[in-house]
Amino acid sequence: MNSVVDKKPRLKTSAMIASIAGEGQVTRSAPFGHALVELARAKTNVIGMTADLGKYTDLHIFAKEFPERYYQMGMAEQLLMGAAAGLSHEGAQPFVTTYAVFATRRAYDFIHQTIAEDNLDVKIVCALPGLTTGYGPSHQAAEDLALMRAMPNMMVIDPCDALDIEQMVPAIAAHKGPVYARLLRGNVPAVLDECNYQFELGKAKMLRDGNDALIVSSGIMTMRALETAKALASDKVDVAVLHVPTIKPLDTETIIREAKRTGRMVIVAENHTVIGGLGEAVATALLSAGVSCTFRQVALPDEFLDAGALPTLHDRYGISANVMAANIKQWLA
């Protein structure tokens, strides 16, 4: 049987995009790696540890500056977490990096039993959170926040840009106890105002006010929310953006106060499945406080996601600024 060969040239797309920055967007290179180096200069007990992913979590910058304080554990995430626990018991403050799927799915029990149960001072900083790679379910950590929120003693952070990451590093180092932080690596967008923004553990920040809708967001969805608000402003739709970098503990006081303002729809936007993340945390807080409002979620569906180029996937699953803007206009109509 003769097979038909398609002679048309195939478009080349990248399934893994090193940066989620848009064309022409201002970025900073490896903010986590540089911030950790600055921290380690002041704190001699800070160490860097990874499971064969130093280059892909920006920890190679730390390794170059402090080779004697850098531990490459190979492709053994369970060993990585167990060793971090042991070094913490000896007085070190480990900053542990890997991909979010490998920490939260492969090494979950080791984190739970050796780090969280003893409330150890280990910072787990993980790249490729949510839908920030197109490699499919093996690498898409769409449920990492739900898993880590459920773990006692664990603080959970989802920074939105380079400034957030730079300010997050010394803040989580000052916190005594385990932290899970999502990481944007490579060329990271810079969208926050350096003059007016300050990262604070457990605090939400109002980045933009508006009377028609309130977007409560974290991670890259704060960047998308700001883009969406700007686009909707041209259509006379006034949208506020409340950035929530700390998922646990949640700043329920600020969220409830802003949600109580009459006449505003509350929309939670997150780069995570609709189950167990920021959306459910906010909904629970509002219901518990007796706040009555129209509530919507922008989040990933409860399913295994497709593989492909990120712009296509973000449009498909409704987390791009264009699709967000169209949906919000429809919800407000």
Image (cartoon, helix red, strand yellow):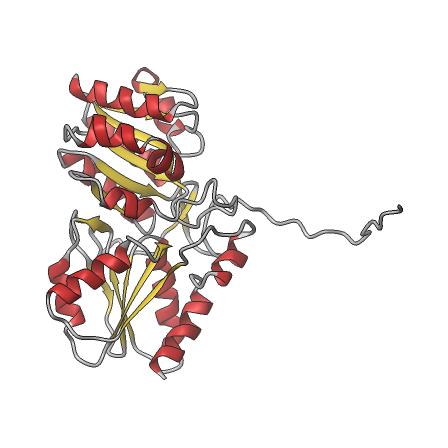
> Does 316 sit left or right of 180 as displayed?
right
* Residue that lies at the very extreme toward the front in this rendered image: 1
Q: Is residue 250 visible?
A: yes
> Does 134 sit left or right of 163 as displayed?
right
Q: Is residue 167 visible?
A: no
Rendered position, 132 above or below 53 = below
- Total labels: the figure holds 0
Residue occupying the point 42% across, 20% down: 74
Q: Position of residue 251 (x, y in %)?
A: 15, 56
> Does 321 sit left or right of 249 as displayed?
right
Q: Position of residue 170 (x, y in %)?
A: 20, 37
Residue occupying the point 14% across, 28% down: 118
Q: Quadrant of residue 184?
A: top left
Residue occupying the point 46% across, 61% down: 317
Q: Position of residue 302 (x, y in %)?
A: 40, 56
Q: Foreground: 73 or 201? A: 73
Rendered position, 258 above or below 8 = below
Q: Foreground: 318 or 186? A: 318
Residue occupying the point 35% across, 58% down: 221
Rendered position, 306 above or below 235 = above
Q: The C terminus lies in which quarter of the figure?
A: bottom left
Q: Quadrant of residue 30?
A: top left
